[in-house]
Image: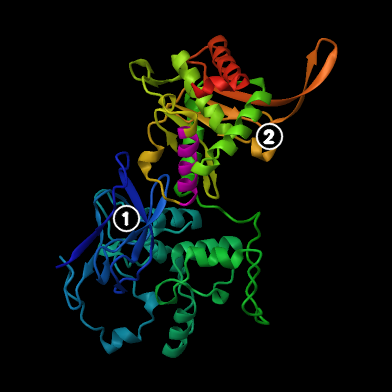
């Protein structure tokens, strides 16, 4: 019996996902537990594994954006027919076989209203390259234009010489790569012919291209004497808006457009906090917990939000909703962009519990082990750039929150005891808040509370 492969629902807030890359070719075999395709959501990417062994038959092309639960493939037993599959087409006649493949244009499927059926990735790529979808020969299900169709499209021109079957086979076998790998190779200037493939059947994956582009990667072969034009430089490359980068692109712009955002900065003396953290690092080491300065800030923020509830709110259609629960988001930088996993009920957690949870979330985000629910429901956010030597910056609010606190570096500052200068440890806090919700004075009072807690950090332990 055929086993359905679907768009998995990875969390309560997830509604759709994209088949970013097929890891098993159409008609290829898969074993139980082996990855079939790479699922991409707004926040995460993960490999979906086979629930049984068999033959994989694709239903949708790479780049398809679909609702959770939609079938994207079937796993069949040997010889089993695909559910609802159309009868196989008859073998082409000798006359048809003699016609160049480029001249055999299949009819393009057209939806109601005249809109050509195409995957989101195909539509985006065609727009970037200025290609009319109606001119492309589709290979997808029910006449849908796929991303590969767009990539392989050649404008009508004088017929090219027909290569011998042996030459064509050698060419197709030498460079078998996923669309993601091809696009990335073009951006990074990587010669796919020199990249060993680690995917099924020697298929070159995105990870193979990234490894080949790494500075430590040694060239596997010398370039031929006659080469194609040099690839585009980094300045000419176009980074596609997809996945996490696309979400950041859209939400940050929307955040600035929809809110009245202002930023204020305040200096904090961190001498006592430095001493406390040093003691806790040693004391909690046997438990595998290592608190960071950001953990101290998160705990201070949680206590300050309880005292200043208007900073723990969001704008809704009916007005301003003050939130009863305190869930603090912590920004984590990834190669593809910034994500904000949530420390839930931060006010009710001890400082040690916050340190353990923040470490778990940061590691999970970097390793792709978190689900959509780990990123949902934050009521306030903390973001740190101190590790990069930044003192003060202007963070952008993570909507629908009303505020976000930026944490700068700890550095040597000067305090005055009478007429005598004294070296102190100093840090700058940068609060961006929504002026529609909170005025400047209460926003400053909120930061003053955070400052007071950090300057007397033993209050964070009770």
Q: Quadrant of residue 391?
A: top right
Q: Position of residue 213 (x, y in %)?
A: 60, 65
Is 263 left or right of 327, judged from the image as shown?
right
Q: Earlier in the sequence, mark 1 or mark 2?
A: 1
Question: For mark 2, what is the residue?
Answer: 390
Q: Is residue 179 above or below residue 364?
A: below
* Residue beneath the point at 45% across and 25% down: 401
Mark 2 Cα-neighbour bin, 10 Å: few <14, some 14–19, many ≥20? some
Q: Is residue 27 above or below residue 134?
A: below
Q: Position of residue 367 (x, y in %)?
A: 47, 52
Magenta stretch, main secondary structure class: helix
Q: Secondary structure at mark 2?
A: loop
Chain part drawn in magenta: 353-367
Question: For mark 1, what is the residue?
Answer: 116
388 or 101: nearer the eye? 388
Q: Secondary structure at mark 1?
A: loop
Total number of numbered discs in the rendering: 2
Question: Can residue 393 be seen by looking at this rendering?
Answer: no
394 or 330: nearer the eye? 330
Is 69 left or right of 119, judged from the image as shown?
left
* Residue beneath the point at 63% across and 66% down: 231
């Amino acid at each position: 019996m055929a086993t359905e492969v679907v768009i998995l629902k990875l969390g309560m807030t997830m509604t759709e996902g994209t088949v970013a890359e097929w890891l098993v070719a159409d008609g290829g075999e898969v074993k139980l537990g082996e990855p079939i395709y790479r699922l991409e959501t707004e926040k995460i990417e993960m490999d979906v594994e086979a629930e049984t062994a068999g033959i994989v038959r694709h239903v949708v092309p790479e780049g398809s954006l679909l609702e959770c639960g939609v079938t994207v493939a079937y796993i069949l037993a040997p010889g089993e027919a695909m559910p609802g599959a159309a009868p196989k087409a008859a073998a082409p006649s000798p006359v048809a076989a003699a016609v160049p493949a480029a001249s055999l244009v299949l009819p393009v499927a057209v939806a109601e209203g005249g809109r050509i059926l195409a995957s989101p990735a195909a539509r985006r790529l065609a727009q970037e390259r200025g290609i009319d979808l109606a001119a492309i020969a589709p290979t997808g299900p029910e006449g849908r234009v796929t991303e590969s169709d767009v990539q392989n499209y050649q404008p009508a021109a004088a017929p090219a010489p027909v290569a011998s079957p042996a030459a064509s086979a050698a060419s197709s076998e030498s460079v078998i790569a996923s669309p993601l790998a091809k696009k990335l190779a073009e951006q990074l200037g990587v010669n796919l012919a020199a990249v060993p493939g680690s995917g099924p059947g020697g298929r070159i994956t995105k990870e193979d291209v990234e490894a080949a582009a790494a500075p430590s990667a040694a060239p596997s072969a010398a370039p031929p004497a006659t080469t194609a034009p040099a690839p585009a430089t980094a300045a000419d490359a176009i980074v596609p808006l997809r996945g996490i980068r696309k979400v950041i692109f859209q939400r940050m712009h929307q955040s600035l457009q929809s809110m009245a955002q202002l930023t204020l900065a305040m200096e904090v003396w961190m001498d006592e906090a430095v001493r406390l953290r040093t003691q806790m690092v040693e004391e909690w080491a046997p438990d595998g917990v290592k608190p960071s300065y950001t953990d101290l800030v998160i705990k201070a923020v949680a206590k300050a939000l309880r005292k200043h509830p208007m900073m723990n709110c969001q704008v809704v259609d009916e007005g301003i909703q003050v939130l009863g629960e305190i869930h603090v988001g912590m920004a984590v930088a990834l190669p593809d962009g910034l994500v904000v996993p949530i420390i839930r009920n931060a006010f009710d957690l001890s400082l040690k519990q916050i340190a353990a949870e923040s470490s778990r979330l940061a590691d999970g985000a970097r390793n792709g082990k978190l689900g959509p629910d780990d990123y949902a429901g934050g009521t306030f956010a903390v973001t740190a750039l101190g590790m990069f030597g930044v003192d003060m910056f202007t963070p952008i609010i993570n909507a629908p929150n009303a505020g976000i606190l930026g944490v700068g570096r700890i550095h040597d500052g000067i305090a005055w005891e009478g007429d005598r200068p004294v070296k102190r440890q100093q840090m700058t806090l940068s609060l961006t808040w929504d002026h529609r919700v909170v005025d400047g004075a209460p926003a400053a009072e909120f930061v003053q509370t955070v400052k007071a807690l950090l300057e007397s950090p033993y209050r964070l332990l009770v």
